[in-house]
Image: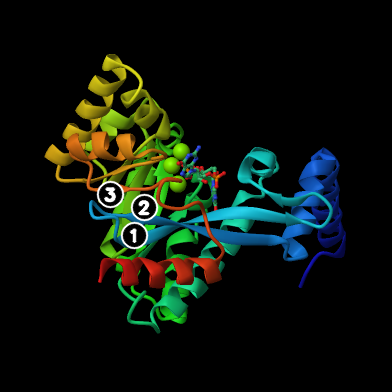
Amino acid sequence: WVNPVLATTILCGAIAAMHADLSRMTAKARSIQRALYNDEFVLVFQPLVDRTGGIIGAEALLRWQHPSKGMLPPSEFISEAQDAGLMPAIGEWVIASAFRELALWQENVLTRHLSLSINITVDHLMQHNFIDELIKNAKNAGIPASLVKLELTESVFASDPDTIVARMKDLAQAGFKFSLDDFGTGFSSLSYLRRLPLEQIKIDRSFVSAASESKKGAVIARIIAQMGAELSLEVLAEGIETAEQWSIMQRFGCTLFQGFLFSRPLSAANLQRFICENKAASE
Ligand code: C2E
Ligand code: MG
Ligand code: MG
Ligand code: MG
């Protein structure tokens, strides 16, 4: 038995809340929400390489294929999406699409060993069903969790670090891997390095470019890389644009690399082509 007055009050409340949310959304946020429903987002993939230049995986990067403005990078819409609370929904789309691609990679001997790195935001990770959904989606897609690398930035530890750490441990238990993205640009990184079930740190592009520009820049990049290596983490250098940067970061002990020197982010089809050429070149 439901009290009709109460039911009506609750219903009106819910509708009012919906309207309130919509009216608080900026026009930009509404167009981002529409883009999600109109399926205007796409993923591009940037190769990750080892010391020999051999491809070991890729990072999925979000693009908005805007009907009139063309291909938009995340800097054009992610912070608005974040502010409007749309990132969990967009993140779900990203994970589903990334898993679909990773499932395709499983069918080809050239790609079945490659890992796929996916950027995750804190509000998505904090959703109560995030862990169950991720495990379920991986199972349904038929992909091993061990090939999925979740990239978090240091900023995730700003709000509720204990919960985040607990969630990371549960996910690590289920086989997923973690990478700390843009390492060195946040504040909480050093204190959390000990506690987190991390497999990898990604040294931010700003340290890589500084390393080839000044003595001080080189010292900082070298110490970060050395610390990661001594903590038994994979150390990936981001934003490698020149052969000189590649050689410097190798000398500092980085084992993995990502940057325009190797490849820009590619469509799924072009990534397949890149992998075939990369394989042919190494034979
Ligand atoms: P990120 O995770 O640090 O990704 C690396 C960014 O550096 C990408 O920019 C990539 O295109 C760019 N990059 C790679 N190599 C080089 C290089 O040699 N030189 C230069 N100048 N840039 C390089 P992008 O794709 O514009 O993404 C920017 C940021 O947006 C990402 O930084 C990430 O924080 C966020 N992002 C991208 N895709 C997603 C996503 O699916 N979900 C979430 N939550 N965030 C995403
Ligand atoms: Mg990233
Ligand atoms: Mg990064
Ligand atoms: Mg970065």
Residue 148, given in percent of the width and then of the height, sits at 37, 63
SS at circle 2: helix
Are circles 2 and 1 on residues that touch, CB within 8 Å?
yes
Determine which of the numbered discs, if any, sits on residue 256 in the image.
3
Other-residue count near label 2 (Cα within 10 Å), few / some / many at <14 / 14–19 / ≥20: some
Please tell me how many numbered marks the rendered image carries: 3
In space, the residues marked 1 and 3 are separated at their CA atoms by 23 Å
For image coordinates 33% across by 74% down, the residue present is 144
Task: Give the amino acid type for the residue marked by disc 1 in the picture.
Answer: Leu
Q: Which residue is mark 2?
A: 167
Residue 184, can we see it?
no
Quick check: 33 above or below 237? below
- Name the quadrant of the C terminus: bottom left
Disc 3: residue Cβ within 8 A of ligand 3's nearest atom? no
Residue 218, given in percent of the width and then of the height, sits at 26, 23
In this view, the residue in front, 204 or 5, is: 204
Please state if 162 lies on the left or on the right of 59 as rendered.
Answer: left
In space, the residues marked 2 and 1 are separated at their CA atoms by 6 Å
Are circles 1 and 3 on residues that touch, CB within 8 Å?
no
- Name the quadrant of the N terminus: bottom right
SS at circle 3: strand
Q: Which residue is mark 1?
A: 171
Are circles 3 and 2 on residues that touch, CB within 8 Å?
no
